[in-house]
Amino acid sequence: MDRNLAWDIVCEFVKSESLRKHMLAVEACMVAYARKFGEDEEKWAITALLHDFDWEIHPEAPDHPMKGEPILAGRGVSEEIRRAILSHATYSGVPRVSRLEKTLFACDELAGFLTACSYVKPGRSIHEVEVRSVRKKLKDKAFARNVNREDIINGATELGVDLDEHIDFCIRAMQARAAELGLAGAATA
């Protein structure tokens, strides 16, 4: 399994452009952390890309990601990556033990939240998003109400990083791939 094969699986199962971009945003954050931690960037990219591949066919808990896992096994995805994907769902019963598992959990909800924060900026750009405004939006329960704030906070805690530093790190990771994520701004989107 390599990143290109993982992306092929995403494109086969995920028709929603916004869901694909979410997976790419999580990948941006995960690859940046892999680089920081000296981990295997491709493995972390594959994990991020595939973590929600079955969301459209299994949109309900606990079907996602449990019913998707055997599909990934059949496609040759390693047990380590499949376990990380299972562990990102708090209801799966699979504890997050490895750094890969903890990082996926820490980046998933936050990447979605940062995308939502970008959309409400005047230029609709991740380059306009700041830690202070993200923290303020986290307190607004009506904003991006489907994003689990507890998962964002717990994710940073499990990863052992300060929440503000984690937010800043992920903002910078997503800024580096802003055009691909559709978050470069209204003029270039």
Image (cartoon, helix red, strand yellow):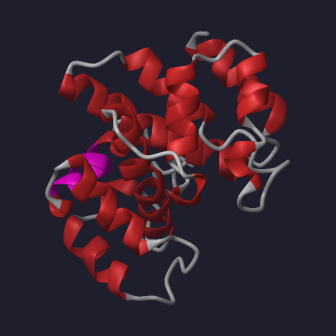
Residue 55 or residue 131, whichever sits in front: 55
Residue 154 screen position, x and y as percent: 31, 63
Q: Quadrant of the N terminus?
A: top right
At x 48%, y 71%, the residue is 148
At x 69%, y 12%, the residue is 76
Main SS, magenta residues: helix
Compared with residue 113, is residue 101 higher up or lower down, i.e. above or below? above
172 relative position to 62: left or right: left
Residue 41 or residue 89, whichever sits in front: 89
Compared with residue 160, is residue 99 higher up or lower down, i.e. above or below? above
Asked if residue 52 lies in the magenta stretch, the reply is: no
137 relative position to 9: left or right: left
Task: Name which quarter of the figure residue 42 lies in.
Answer: top left
4 relative position to 40: left or right: right
Residue 58 screen position, x and y as percent: 81, 51
At x 77%, y 62%, the residue is 60
Residue 70 screen position, x and y as percent: 76, 29
Task: Name which quarter of the figure residue 71 lies in.
Answer: top right
Residue 65 or residue 143, whichever sits in front: 65
Residue that lies at the very extreme toward the front in this rendered image: 93
Residue 118 screen position, x and y as percent: 44, 64
At x 51%, y 58%, the residue is 90
Does residue 167 show up? Answer: no
Does residue 130 show up? Answer: yes
Q: Which stretch is magenta? A: 165-172
Q: How many marks?
A: 0
